[in-house]
Amino acid sequence: MGSTFGHLFRITTWGESHGGAVGVTVDGCPPNLDLSEADIQAELDRRRPGQSRVTTQRREADACEILSGVFEGKTLGSPILILVWNTDAKSEHYVPFRHIYRPSHADYAYDAKYGIRNWQGGGRASARETVGRVAAGAIAKKILRERFGTEIIGYVKQIHKLYADVDTDRVTQAQVEANIVRCPDAQCAEEMIAQIDWARRQGDSLGGVVELVARNVPVGLGDPVFDKLEADLAKAVMSLPASKGFEIGSGFAGTTLTGSEHNDPYEMRDGQVHTRTNNSGGIQGGISIGEPLVLRVAFKPTATINKTQETVTDQGEPTTLAAKGRHDPCVLPRAVPMVEAMVALVLADHYLRQQAQCLQ
Amino acid sequence: MGSTFGHLFRITTWGESHGGAVGVTVDGCPPNLDLSEADIQAELDRRRPGQSRVTTQRREADACEILSGVFEGKTLGSPILILVWNTDAKSEHYVPFRHIYRPSHADYAYDAKYGIRNWQGGGRASARETVGRVAAGAIAKKILRERFGTEIIGYVKQIHKLYADVDTDRVTQAQVEANIVRCPDAQCAEEMIAQIDWARRQGDSLGGVVELVARNVPVGLGDPVFDKLEADLAKAVMSLPASKGFEIGSGFAGTTLTGSEHNDPYEMRDGQVHTRTNNSGGIQGGISIGEPLVLRVAFKPTATINKTQETVTDQGEPTTLAAKGRHDPCVLPRAVPMVEAMVALVLADHYLRQQAQCLQ
Amino acid sequence: MGSTFGHLFRITTWGESHGGAVGVTVDGCPPNLDLSEADIQAELDRRRPGQSRVTTQRREADACEILSGVFEGKTLGSPILILVWNTDAKSEHYVPFRHIYRPSHADYAYDAKYGIRNWQGGGRASARETVGRVAAGAIAKKILRERFGTEIIGYVKQIHKLYADVDTDRVTQAQVEANIVRCPDAQCAEEMIAQIDWARRQGDSLGGVVELVARNVPVGLGDPVFDKLEADLAKAVMSLPASKGFEIGSGFAGTTLTGSEHNDPYEMRDGQVHTRTNNSGGIQGGISIGEPLVLRVAFKPTATINKTQETVTDQGEPTTLAAKGRHDPCVLPRAVPMVEAMVALVLADHYLRQQAQCLQ
Amino acid sequence: MGSTFGHLFRITTWGESHGGAVGVTVDGCPPNLDLSEADIQAELDRRRPGQSRVTTQRREADACEILSGVFEGKTLGSPILILVWNTDAKSEHYVPFRHIYRPSHADYAYDAKYGIRNWQGGGRASARETVGRVAAGAIAKKILRERFGTEIIGYVKQIHKLYADVDTDRVTQAQVEANIVRCPDAQCAEEMIAQIDWARRQGDSLGGVVELVARNVPVGLGDPVFDKLEADLAKAVMSLPASKGFEIGSGFAGTTLTGSEHNDPYEMRDGQVHTRTNNSGGIQGGISIGEPLVLRVAFKPTATINKTQETVTDQGEPTTLAAKGRHDPCVLPRAVPMVEAMVALVLADHYLRQQAQCLQ
């Protein structure tokens, strides 16, 4: 059941990296929403491999097709099936690793759990699975934007030891998309790109942090006690490949403050309750309070590298692995739309849940 | 639906801080497990308020009663209802705040979402809700311990700016329980206790980090792609009151490594595949691989403080709040059994899920 | 997970017939609903054993307590825990059957599935479990009545070979409650009572049919394709003990009509689309259309009888069983509030789901 | 969320009658099962329109493609996407009814609920949606057959006023498939075919009953109390288009027996507990006991007829409807594989659930 996410805005992704196709089924999208493939393609293009020199060079157009749930340009309220064919799956690249466990990949884990794995391109554990998430997230984003004017802006906050300077209150999507590394701090972005180029030449890879701010999030999203908004956000982003950490608002740094330093005083602004500071990250008691959501996600350096590594075969024999060919030296730029999609999916789901909870 | 957690080992907590009682319904516990109230009480005693001078001074015996699901000392496979009566709920303490939003508490959020709140003691947002989690977690722990010898050891890793030195491979439960702050680094523990005493005298509060190691976790737990083990763990602990961050294995620190530094080489030990290092934190591709799980949870400083704070009333009038009386200067020592419970619940649920997935 | 019902208005019942207590946790009840124990007690009194000479003579006051989720007379939006203590559980009655499988009871099935059973009073398989359903159903009924004026009227349509004559358009709750057998056809009711008295004297039992009409059901409830309203209603009532069949609208009898006879022509009445006939039973395409819901549920004769029966022991030895003492010669009168409760739970759940599905 | 069925063996169907394609996503299928498109095609061919003169004449090859979840002929444990393109969708046939509500179809209900509908071919309410169910059911059947030798045999028991004579203990799949009406009583089958031919010439349609027997069902399937096996079976088949009633074992007829007549005595056979009679229909206390499951499903006469009918337009104007062209005079022969598929899906899901419930 692990391929389904959400309760009322519910998606099921399917597809292996080197199977026939990948995609998603979206069940629970409200009817009468204008929706076309172009709405979805725009987000897929931000996730697409080969979009710039800092990403993997697999060449997939990732052109999506909507096979159900939309009629004469509008959603029907029935499941929306979105499909993307795999066209550049070079399975022969993976033949040498057929019986070798690539370190910090899912190869061993899948074999141990299932007794079988698709050894071509990582199968289901490949980042290619996120095609379906980003496609579904595009619909969620559209709902939130049209209904509430919600802006969901992710960006690269850190790569390796380079930290960008970003004002969460002012950052814009345009600033993010102004460079191929998706870092709104233009100067830091240049350094990041150089760093990624260096890593690629070394056959090595880099990790980092994606930060995300969501503005105009409606008040009242999130369900105490287990489905707190931050809990569902944490699960959402920690389900992305390579993520190792999550924090909301003040996060880990906030643990060194005292309560009197950390508490966000309330005040009235424009006739509305607001907090003066935002250590809460837009959520209190598990419920959105109308302040911007601010969260961060840590991504480890990509496991695929071209340096020689020690490992074992699926028969338990020690061996070494020296991969060749294209690899993704840094997933961060492409992780930005993935994180945005997951956040949008959580918010859309909780928006529908919130509607259900009041007698109207 | 936010009060239910888990798919196959499924719990529903219920109860407000100052209602008649709090408790939990556990559905999906396998039959024929030896279970008595003593098994549960042992864990509740670790969570109990008033257990030492570093916690809240609310005095609750928290004696549990099992009202269903157990017969002649064994589980029946039917829902287990565990109930704890509220006995020291001093609602009069809360009368002055009836119409005042306490900063960084859930008061405003609940009013905004529900249009009503139990203003006595935080109602459902109170840490008292975790009684049910810890009670259910005691059952999950017992299942894992009896079946796999799984050890789940949480401890205080950091309070405010004090960082303990703990070896995750060697730390024992006895070391953790050797002092009232539940920090296995005895020297650091003393400093932490002094720091908490200081905060209490100031009417202020402190945050920190709970670290947890789980050993003898069976291989194969966790479901790609959304129900990855780390995703469910993240949700579990981020649903605890006051948690602000989660990381697994190398976490945020790992983002500054390169892939060749971060990847965990495989090797054979005792005829079994193992990793030489454990940056993965025991999970690869969302699935446990038999190495120890290592995770950390950030808790903000407790929102209840006795210092004067600026805020607004539920009518939108600016006011100040100067609470008096008992407060919990640091939730960390009591957060340890809460984190352990949530981790145990996730593992038990995935253990049952794993059993379901293979044709036997 | 089998003890939970509903998606958004979600209940979990717990408790064995002879454990300490039985009850229910209701998660998802909207906030700000006026609710007291009296609302629930009224329905429990209709389900209560010993209420008349035609039911089981177990004497339970079935006085309910609300332990959470209600504050100052209103629901909070948090889980509502309702508890009823077992007071007349005479376990000694069951000692002779401890090792004997009572025919057409759940004894053997539970042993085969769980390897353990509470042999006192049927444990979880007892009709006593329905206390929680009826309590939760009382809340669902109240929501529907207050919001839509929905009337849910169940009654005994048939007992053994006696068939009542009831006009589904005109039958009232008062007519149903006018006699102890809950049959609105007064003359047939007398015959039914005599028949039950006869069965009791024989130490035998009788089955029958409960019919239910629900008026003022809002249009649009039910989700294609698997959660069609009739599908969820079927599951709801087929989960009641002793139910063997379900039909909606024309049901089995409708299979002998042709399409031109069976189709319900549309017409306008009061500016609203209506059907002239109601073979559909108020549902088309799985969705309520505003016509009265009409459904029927078959209940087998109660399995507990005092006649001598052939059976086997839990060691596989042939034996005979000759029970003594109180037995319930006909569950039908008490099944009426059970069926009503289940229907109300389905409607309330789909009402909340319907609210979630539209962009508002 | 209504397009998903099952908890552990979980399917989501998608697709409209006249959209691009229809299909299903199967999540939770165990790994290492041999599976090819041929396994699925065999069942789809039994459901296919145009397979004989007694069904609808829409001509669809219904050739399926597996796009994910299978690798080198074996299941991976990841979601299986099965797709069937729509090729004979003649939308022009539906243009005249674009604004007319066809009696006892879902047109009005969908408009009332969603404010939009795909008026081409019934959209999501079309029996074409069951392609996905039958495809997924083929996998469930295969699992049960290979693991337990489970035989699931459905057949036409009644059409209009013609009742077949079938021995549930002896009926074979070959007898069922020996004629185009899928009635194992060869003589009755001929009369049924003649009756359907008559109805087609009249432009009218017929209803009937599908009966199903499942042999070699493992003991212990079904979860008290809401997910009783008969409850889940009832929901499963009542979610099929045109179904109006369900009964298990003695069903409605059993209500006229006394308890002493109805109870199934236990006896030992081959060292195993069995019942001498099977009024229980293979289920007691909601749990399978190893006897054959026997159930029946009532299907109303198909709503599409060619006779003139009174109705209203979507603007509330009275009008008449006189459809022309192909229609399905009797859905019963094609309903057989649909009922079988739904039963198989319930059994496979409960088989996986049962595996999860025991400490192994």
Image (cartoon, coloured by chain):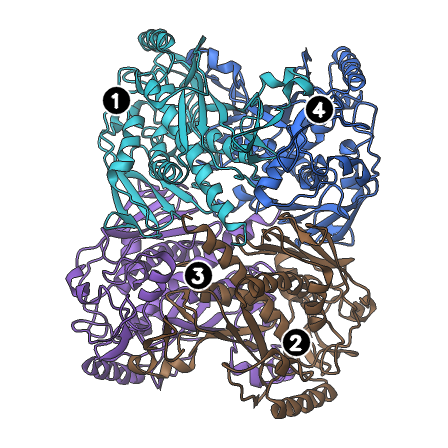
Chain colours: A blue, B cyan, C purple, D brown
Q: Position of residue D350 (x, y in %)?
A: 49, 58
Q: Residues within 10 Å of mark 2 (few under 14, many from 20)?
A: many
**Disc 2 from disc 4: Cα separation:** 55 Å
Q: Are marks 4 and 1 on the same chain?
A: no
List the residue tagged with mark 1.
B50
Could you say whether the residue bearing mark 1 is in a helix, strand or loop?
Answer: loop
Residue at point 71% right, 62% down? Answer: D123
Q: Amino acid at mark 3?
A: Gly
> Which comes before the other along the chain, label 3 or label 2?
3
Mark number displayed over residue D303: 2
* Residue D54 x, y percent position in the rendering: 71, 82
Dot 4: what SS? helix
Residue under mark 3: which chain is it in?
Answer: D
- Please state the chain letter of the residue tagged with numbered disc 4 in the rendered image: A
Label 3 vs label 1, nearer the camera: 3
Residue type highlighted by circle 2: Ala
Q: Are marks 3 and 1 in contact (CB under 8 Å)?
A: no
Crowd around label 3: few <14 · some 14–19 · many ≥20 (10 Å): many
Q: Which residue is mark 3?
A: D222
Q: Chain letter of disc 2?
A: D
